[in-house]
Image: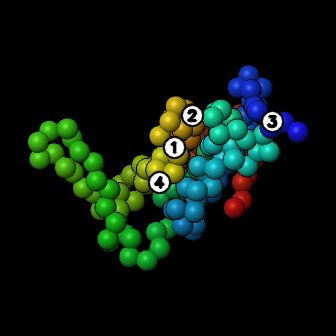
Amino acid sequence: MSTFMQKKEAVVRKWYIIDAAGKPLGKTAVAAANLLRGKNDPTFTPHIDCGNFVIVINADKAVLTGKKMEQKYHYHHSGYIGGMKSVQYKTLMATKPERAMELAVKGMLPDTTPGRAAFTRLKVYAGEAHKHAAQKPEAYEF
């Protein structure tokens, strides 16, 4: 019996919508990353970009468990000497909750060409409203 290999021309992409209201940020990000890579499909092939589109709504209502709001920081560097920047997650969730969700999902995707392509299919919105109703996304429960 031979192993099935997905062809990139035969990939059919679906649209899924995930509601993050009241759910942990990390668990929502895991579900989104798995859908973006296509790991829920029986035709999953690791080296082929066979994932789906994911819309995450209510990112501002996602919760961080424990003391992560006070103790967790997002670090990035400006590229200049002494340019290390840090933002507390309490501030990040209050000002840019979409960015917090994107960072969580990006950290769960592989740093390869299919991983970077999968990240472009992620759409994150702070509230209920999104502009992808024409694609008829299916609700995804995890």
Q: Is residue 34 left or right of residue 126?
A: right
The residue that label 2 is drawn on is 114
The residue that label 3 is drawn on is 4
Which dot, 2 or 3, sits closer to the camera? 3
Q: Residues within 10 Å of mark 3 (few under 14, many from 20)?
A: few
Question: Which image quadrant: the N terminus?
Answer: top right
Q: Is residue 97 above or below residue 116?
A: below
Local secondary structure at mark 4: helix
Badges 4 and 3: C-beta atoms under 8 Å apart?
A: no
Residue 104, disc: 4
Amino acid carrying label 4: it is: Ala
The answer to which of marks 4 and 3 sits earlier in the sequence is 3
Residue 110, disc: 1
Q: Residues within 10 Å of mark 1 (few under 14, many from 20)?
A: some
Question: Which image quadrant: the C terminus?
Answer: bottom right
Colour scheme of the picture:
rainbow
